[in-house]
Amino acid sequence: MKILWLDINSSYSHSSMALPAIHARIMDRDDIRWKAVSGTVNDSPGKLASEVVGYGPDIIAATWWLFTHEILVAVLSRCKAMLPEVVIVGGGPEFAGNNRLFLERNTFMDAVFRGEGEESVPEWLSVWNSKEHWKDISGLCYIDDDGQYHDNGIAKVMEYSKLRYPESSPFFRWNSPFVQIETSRGCFNSCAFCVSGGDRPVRCLEPETLYERLANVRRHGVRDVRILDRTFNYDIDRACTMLDIFREFHPDLRFHLEIHPALLDGRLRNKIASMPAGMLHLEAGIQSLDSEVLRKSCRKGSLKASLEGLEYLSALDNVAVHADLIAGLPGYSFEMLYEDVLRLLKIGADEIQLELLKVLPGTGMRNKASEYGIVYSPVPQYEVLRTGSIEPEELLMAGYMSRVVDLYYNYSFFKDVFASLAVENHGFLYEFTDFLRERSVLDSPLGQESRGSYLYDFCILNYNGYVSEISAAWVNSGLSLKKKPAERVMKMSRGDAENLEDNFTFNVLKGTYRKDYRMYYLPPDGCGHKGYLFGFDAADHKAFPVFFAEVGRK
């Protein structure tokens, strides 16, 4: 038996865990020959189909995500046309709901699996060419030869901790910039927008197994580990144990994980605060700062406790914190969303993500879409188009606003001044988003220099009191001193530079002053701000100043 796994991902840095997880389960079977054809959503469907067909498989399998749905249809329909006898099956989040319509429309597909495949796929492989026995395979959905649709429920691996882990398969990709380790399945929460909402029971990996797997990751030289655990801190004892394990792998490994900010008792707070700096990247689920929106979305956890938890985490210097909001949730107006963005900016999370609701198959949100007045795209990516609380134009604006926050707040040299502008001036974020939208630049890549130039131009016209801060951020980011945002920055003569302490009072913000630095001066702007001094080390020719100070003349 020859199995071809079509491994399509959104990019080469992201890889599906399904192939190595299922292969690890049956890799000892010598009657099966496996081959993987990998690609991304940007590859040619014709080229991928040709490579698949060239192998001459008996079975073609693929994992379906909302981002890969379109290209998989294009590739697999071509494969079926060229190999009419091949059996094509799929699995993944796309099949978490009712699959009758999908199978009726996409007749090149023979069956799809709903749920966890490590046990159901091996069972199916024993009867793959005998459709009369498919009715006994948990999670399998298919249309029989008489045209009848069969739905075998949801497959679950109850003894999850006993599975052979994916890293044991030769198909596990060690050449990615990060690896994923799934430490639990299921979720205590019931979020209606999530495919894991209400997935019971929660099944967890044993601590000893986690340690063994992390040691294997370290041996392979991978630095970043993404922990797939939607219930990481639901069990405080377990969370503390896992953090102790993570600490043992510092500084070789860094960890990205999801955390519920409402579930932080004093012990867990102290544990997180004691972690080595840079070891943890925490994704703190917020979604909305309105308790009624969260109630309609079936998200458990006190809003007050979530805010307190987020504020605590964001104030820590040793961890990076990511917070998110979802536009289009039931009862969530644009005005409410806008206020929530400003509040997150004020709290100061390291990253803020604003995304549009995706009404995914198999979620409670899709089942209640009509009740909540949610209109969504019937094809991937199933994004919300309108609700009873937010109009299409407002959703479009929310999408642009998300792009602006990402460009100017997340990973940006202009983070601090942007946050100050938004928090201190209620209309700034909307006005600046509209300014960039009118110039048609938000749908294209935008480098740091372009970002700074647009912000500078906008504030020259509308928020002049922040222009000096933008110029200072520009210089500190190592951008050209010959461009407009640095137009007021002047190079100091050697004599003036050597006698700075005689003429200025210093508030040093970075580095230590030395008389041999090349010094530049940004004078006060007339809006009550002091001037700034920048010192460059002539010996290393770096574009970034090594000394930065706020100054006033004596």
Image (cartoon, grey):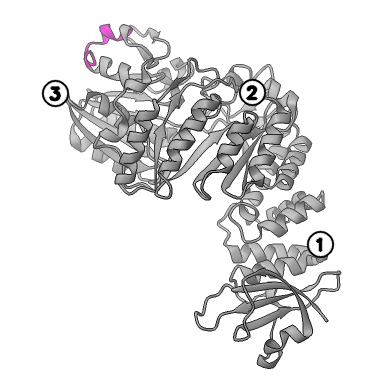
Q: Residues within 10 Å of mark 2 (few under 14, many from 20)?
A: many
Q: Residues within 10 Å of mark 3 (few under 14, many from 20)?
A: few
Res 248 quadrant in image: top left
> Is 129 included in the stretch rendered in magenta?
yes
Please provide percent x and percent y for residue 64. 41, 30
Name the residue at 18% across, 32% down.
56
On the rendered structure, is 293 left or right of 29? right
Compute the Cα span from label 2 to label 3. Answer: 47 Å
On the rendered structure, is 281 left or right of 89? right
Res 214 quadrant in image: top left
Looking at the image, tell me whether mark 1 or mark 2 is earlier in sequence order.
2
> Is 193 included in the stretch rendered in magenta?
no
- Between residues 135 and 466, which one lies in front from this camera angle? 466
Q: What segment is highlighted magenta in the picture? A: 126-135
- Whether residue 357 is visible: no
Compute the Cα span from label 1 to label 3. Answer: 71 Å
On the rendered structure, is 469 left or right of 117? right
Please provide percent x and percent y for residue 318. 57, 49
What residue type is disc 3 on?
A: Asp
Q: Quadrant of the N terminus?
A: top left
Please provide percent x and percent y for residue 309. 67, 35
Which residue position is annotated with label 2?
A: 299
What residue type is disc 1 on?
A: Tyr
Which residue position is annotated with label 3?
A: 31
Q: Secondary structure at mark 1?
A: loop
Name the residue at 74% across, 66% down.
469
Which residue position is annotated with label 1?
A: 463
Q: Quadrant of the C terminus?
A: bottom right
